[in-house]
Amino acid sequence: MSRASESTGQTRALLPLVSVLLVAVAGLELLARFTGMRAVQDAAWITMLCAVILSARRLGAREYYLVAASAAVTVLVILLRPDPEPILIGALDQAVFLMSFILLLGLLQATAKTSPSVAELGAFLTRQPPGRRYAALSGGTALLGVLFNIGVVSFLVPLIQQGIHRAAPGDALNPIRERRQISALLRGFAWSVTWSPTAIAPLIVADLLPGIERIVWMGYAFPVFMILMVAGWLEDRVRFRAFKPKGVLPVMAWPRTAALRFAATTVWFLLLVLGFVWLFDESIVFGVLAACPIMVIGWLVAQQGRAGVPSRLRQMIGTDLPASVNIAVTLATSGYIGRAAAGLTPAESVAEALGLATTPDWLMLVILPTLTALISLLALSPTMMAVFLGSFFAALPVLPADPTLIAFSISCGWALSMTFSPFATLVLVVSRASGIPISTLTWRWNLLFTTFAAILLFPVFYLLTGGH
């Protein structure tokens, strides 16, 4: 037996144990949130470390880099801080939360993947006339992302490419069709993170920064999302005004039943989230984490009946969950690095040196997203920056602006990065699913849109702060 096949065999043999550990990480995190017991939280991050070690052969270059960076920042905290233990424990807690969150959403995504209603809606979005296809894909991606999260991208990209090929096989203009549709999808998902109740960025920041009003934040974000969707549609129409399609894919009728079922599923999920928030007087973060397992079971029962649930769950836990380990490690290490780096940063001294107390609120809130997008070019992921900035502002005795506006600003930086940074998870997922180079997805196709979005934030934050 060759070394390669022997290594593969060993990796497969560890899969059941990795699956058990990943389930344990999510379960212990939930239990810790329910009970508030420190021992359970510690058990969660010890289990997480074991899962990462046993998954080492499945990890890629990005994950190894982030694990190495986590080790490096740990050494720096130990050497440079007189009180390293609270910082490192806080960083580990952050890592466990992010890993648990993406694993639970991964199970929800796997459940959605087998839903006939979701499949019908996805096909409908990709089979619209050119005049309304941009809005359908951009807005539809954002809405499907509430339950599907980033998995909506892996689901829709193949549908887009297959639809283009069916409409005009071998047409020289197909690359333009692909650019227009995938750009619409990318932009829609990127800016949905500013308002979506299940988006990772807002939940990270809400978990770190006290005093945030999530409903108010969503009220700020959704109009900006709509403005950018209209601006993106106009840019698409003007840029490709000379484009004359030949092949036309038959327009699919509105799948009314599928849409109603998906809407009912989404509403039920949000009611579960709000129910847990009210019942336990906890945050939206807690509500989303607690609602996911119930939602998964309920949706599987609705799809397959009670008899089919155990076998489907075994498949999801045994196959789908380990397949999520790379992105889970990426998010966990990014969160760890961001939280530990914030612990290394003397927040008050830095804030004083930067003059945050005297800088106009609107100007600081505009600079944060642009700075986040630019720093992301240094291979610092948007997740890492969101955790760092959330922790940095949380450490200040007096916030330099309204906490809800600060949180909204941080999420805008995340959104900008997702159409600009070659290291953003969204771009990596789209590139992997489509085969399109990362630089093409970001700088070639979306640099103008990203620049417009960054400029738009000037009047937005000026108006929201009243010019202060």
Image (spheres, rainbow, N blue to C red):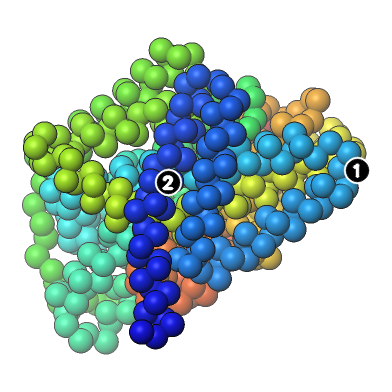
Residue closer to the observer: 380 or 412: 380
**Mark 1 to mark 2: distance in Å?**
43 Å
Please, is residue 231 above or below residue 192 in the view? Answer: below
Q: Is residue 20 left or right of residue 60?
A: left
Question: Along the polypeptide, which appears first: circle 1 or circle 2?
Answer: 2
For the point 88% across and 47% down, the residue is 80
**What percent of the width, then of the height, locates residue 459?**
62, 42
Report whether residue 452 is seen: no
For the point 42% across and 34% down, the residue is 27
Q: Give the SS element for disc 2.
A: helix
- The N terminus is located in which quarter? bottom left
Q: Is residue 80 left or right of residue 126?
A: right
Residue closer to the observer: 209 or 328: 328
Please, is residue 408 above or below residue 119 in the view? Answer: above
Q: Amino acid at mark 2?
A: Leu
* Residue corresponding to mark 1: 353
Residue closer to the observer: 119 or 53: 53
The answer to whether mark 1 and mark 2 are in CB contact below 8 A is no
Q: Nearer the viewer, mark 1 or mark 2?
A: 2
* Residue corresponding to mark 2: 22
User: Which image quadrant for residue 173?
Assistant: bottom left
**What percent of the width, then of the height, locates residue 49?**
56, 49
User: Which image quadrant for residue 458?
Assistant: top right
For the point 28% across and 60% down, the residue is 156
Q: Amino acid at mark 1?
A: Ala
Q: Residues within 10 Å of mark 2 (few under 14, many from 20)?
A: many
For the point 10% across and 57% down, the residue is 252
